[in-house]
Amino acid sequence: MRHSISHTLLITLLAVIISCRAPLVQTGTETRNIPVAEATNPLDSNIIRLYLPYKNLLDKDMNRVISYSESEMEKDKPESLLTNFLGDLLLEEAGKTELAQTENIVPSVSFFNYGGIRTSLPKGDITVGKVYELMPFENELVYLKLDGNTMKEFLDYIARKGGDSVGGVRLKISDGKAVDIKIGGQDFDAGKAYWLVTNDYVAGGGDGLEVLKQRLDYKTTGLLIRELIIQNLEAKQKNHETIHVTLDGRISNE
């Protein structure tokens, strides 16, 4: 996870520089107005000298191209190219984690909350920096095991919101309720338990999703969703795959 490590190194460097300065001892007080301007408060040249190589390294990484999209992707409801792309990507990556493999977790539904999608993705080159703009939060990938009734309540929440970013599920919205639900291509079964993969923020009740606290099980991964997005795009680029997304009617109004 080169991106997180680079930022950590920069922050650590600045902290060390600041901590190495001679301690100040207050011997008295004096009150006066001091204009705040670069001319009267020059930046420490030593900090600048040590900081610049790390800044240049970070800038280079942020500008690194990791994928190519055949079309511009923006979020919209009930579905959109961007929400479909993220929902599918999350479900794909969730099935490949070490935790999923060792504990035989097969995620059925993914959820990437609409409010957490902060920008669009352009047609053409996609850079690391663009993924940071898309998802600036340090959200972690988590698994929630939900019984059928709780899953239905969760899907009704999506219906009330007019749609969202999901993978693995298809539904229609009728009077603010989710109907004609299919999960993994099969008719929804209220007597069955399903694994939902999402982020730790909504798992804790964020965005009004208190219903997700009614889970049967909860598994954390320690993996940042942003890093998984970058990992997924890098792998596709390595295989000479471009991003091609379509609307497939996974969420529609009845």
Image (spheres, grey):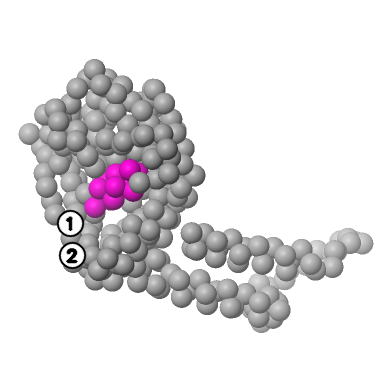
Q: Main secondary structure of the magenta part?
A: helix
Question: How far from the left and from the top, in percent, is residue 117?
Answer: 33, 51
Q: Residue lying at the far right in this picture: please name it.
A: 27
Closer to viewer: mark 1 or mark 2: 1
Q: Is residue 120 above or below residue 99?
A: below
The reply to whether dot 1 and dot 2 touch (C-beta < 8 Å) is yes
Question: How far from the left and from the top, in percent, is residue 248?
Answer: 11, 47
In this rendering, does residue 11 appear at all? yes
Q: Which residues are magenta?
A: 85-95
Task: Using the rendered view, name the quadrant where residue 16 is placed.
Answer: bottom right
Question: How far from the left and from the top, in percent, is residue 209?
Answer: 36, 31
Q: Earlier in the sequence, mark 1 or mark 2?
A: 2
Q: Residue at x 39, y 45 (%)?
A: 97
In this rendering, does residue 201 appear at all? no
Residue on which the image places disc 1: 245
Q: Nearer the viewer, residue 140 or 98?
A: 98
**Mark 1 surroundings within 10 Å by alpha-carbon count, few (fewer than 14), some (14 through 19), many (20 or more):** some
Work out how far the residue at label 1 is from the one at label 2, CA to CA, in angstroms.
8 Å
Q: Amino acid at mark 1?
A: Val
